[in-house]
Amino acid sequence: MSIQQKIEGLRNELREHNYNYYILDNPTISDYDFDIQLKELQGLEAAHPEFYDANSPSLRVGGEVTKNFNTVVHEHRMYSLDNSYSKEDLLDWEKRIKKMIDGEVGYTCELKYDGASISLTYENGSLLRAVTRGDGTQGDDVTANIKTIKSVPLKLKGNFPKKFDIRGEIVLPFEGFNKMNEERLDIGEEPYRNPRNTASGSLKLQDSAEVARRPLECLLYNITGSNLGFDTQFESLEKARQMGFKVPNASKLVTSVDEVLEFVEYWDVHRHDLPYETDGVVIKVNDLQQQEELGFTSKAPRWAMAFKFKAEQVSTRLNEITYQVGRTGAITPVANLEPVELAGTTVKRASLHNADQIEKLDIREGDEVFVEKGGEIIPKIIAVDLSKRPVNSKPTQYITHCPECDTELERTEGDAKHYCPNYNGCSVQIIGRIQHYISRKAMDIEGLGGETVALLVNEGLISNYSDLYTLTKEDVLPLERMAEKSAENLVNGIEASKQIPFERVLFAIGIRFVGETVAKKLAKHYKSIDALANATIEDLVSVDEIGGRIAESVVDFFSSEANKLNLKKLRTVGVQMEISAEKLANQTDLLKGLSIVVSGVFETVSRNELKKMIEDNGGKVSSSISSKTSYLVAGDKMGPSKLAKAETLGVAIISEQEFLEKLK
């Protein structure tokens, strides 16, 4: 057997195992054996790059970094759906259909999964691209991220149309979502709010390896194209299953609105048994020829309707309002409720957000309150049952001092939250900052979790993140549940973090309002901690997308003597406090101050590479042409509207080769 045959054989085996596990839920191989086969394939592919396949199962682990997501025009527009909330709405919809269609009309009922809409394009049985819904006309190309989702087939099974689009939802099952939140809480991070938003946000992560770590699934429901080989929506669902797609089995063929409502009533109860979020039922005219006759309005297909479930509400007693302190000192009021069942879970607490929210709803301890689950996950108080308010009830007085350290709280004008200003003395803030510092997106210190950080602080072994680098195995061994190997891993993980690049260090040190994206911008602009520390507010606001609030926060951070001392310790132990020489060698200021639009297909380098070149040389990549555009880099098949706008505004238009010459 040749090397190429061996590689193809492994790919086919792994695809079949993926299909059995993620689509049929019937694994035929152990996880260990699967991993052994995958590693063998990865080794062979690395040694023989001439046999590269963009849709190899080995690419599901991710690793591609996408700085900018290209905008792609949908070949077939992705429409919204009209909503209904009653039997009357559905009957009116049916009347409109029967006015336009002669003969019998059947319907397919499908569950409406609440996730992030996606359009997958397949050509000759292989995944060509994956594009977000966007505005329905165009969306973002997120192919690299979608390839990491195991339930998305990279190669199709059986017979399939030559080219087609299939639409669906990227969802995050409850089990995986809860596990992700447990991990975030362990490192002192805020939990994700709900599965839908988390799934949607996952599609735009720049590192596909991070997407691969998230237990996302893709549920498909609609095939669009020509010469598809089926005549009804119900047939199309079965065809999609045969090709290897994950298509929910809940769909049902019906012939009347009464049957539709039976389906709705059944699933309004049983949806809580499902592993995913659902927010309604989608009813579609089953016959595709009838769909074509009915056509579309400017916003939605006339042949489909979404029936939305009502948000579940319960009432319960608010026993007590307590207050939590975050790592930035922000105070969050929490409603402690009499436990109540809501949407399949027991709810005991709900966030009250801030003092303004409490005042707006006039929420008081002892009140009977109405609780609703936003996105089926996060409980929120939506109203107070004033008829049950105790006669001796008193308005809530928001706390004036920190519940942890008793420092008087502060609230700046225009800010919704109160803050504890005891930055260096409030233990909860100290623990929270260190937990943020060690988190995966920051310093990613293996062997060190949120609980261990709290133990280290409470035992007096550390009082800030720079103290981590003084820890020895002997220091941590006496800690609860700390074995010799765990202690070694912890100390080794701290040592390894010295190699984390500067932009992540800048995110890790916890400057208020400086998240991942802002940290990257500041690192790229200032290139070292010293240059950033010496920047004035005026300097900072001149940096692209850095506003006054961020600028003030950065200056405040570096004016603190305690912070200066921490940073000095980090530098002394070898933490990266500037951009590496290797990165600097690839960056210039040749395009500084220029705003450049890239459009079309290019020959020498890809569009993404062009955009990276612009950013690496100090320029700003813009998606739209305006009077502030410095020039347009025009490739083949560029949209005529962009070209016309550039000409109208007098924007200079240059070719790919002219741009590359400028960089020389």
Image (cartoon, rainbow, N blue to C red):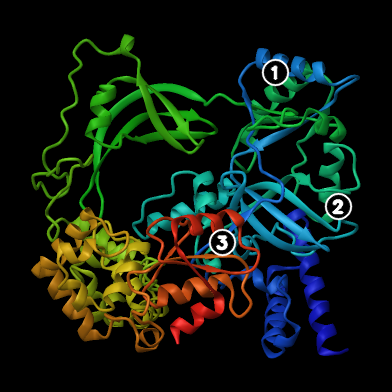
Disc on the earlier residue, 2 or 3: 3
Q: Is residue 479 at least partly visible in the picture?
A: no
Quarter-of-image position of residue 615: bottom left
Three-letter amino acid code of the residue under disc 3:
Asn
- Determine contact: label 1, label 3, CB under 8 Å: no
Task: Give percent across and percent down for residue 454.
Answer: 27, 62
Task: Give the vertical position of 579 relative to 352 (above or below).
Answer: below
The amino acid type of the residue labelled 2 equals Gln
According to the image, label 1 marks what residue? 90
Q: Nearer the viewer, residue 314 or 256?
A: 256
Callout 3: SS: loop
| Residue identifier under label 2 | 242
In the shown orientation, is residue 191 left or right of residue 404?
right
- The residue labelled by disc 3 is 70
Separation of marks 2 and 3 at Cα, in angstroms: 31 Å
Select label 1 or label 3 by which is in front.
Answer: 3
Write the residue at 80% across / 48% down. 225
Does label 1 or label 3 sit earlier along the sequence?
3
The residue shown at (45%, 87%) is: 664
Task: Please tell me which residue is depicted at 85% across the width and 29% down the height of the picture.
Answer: 290
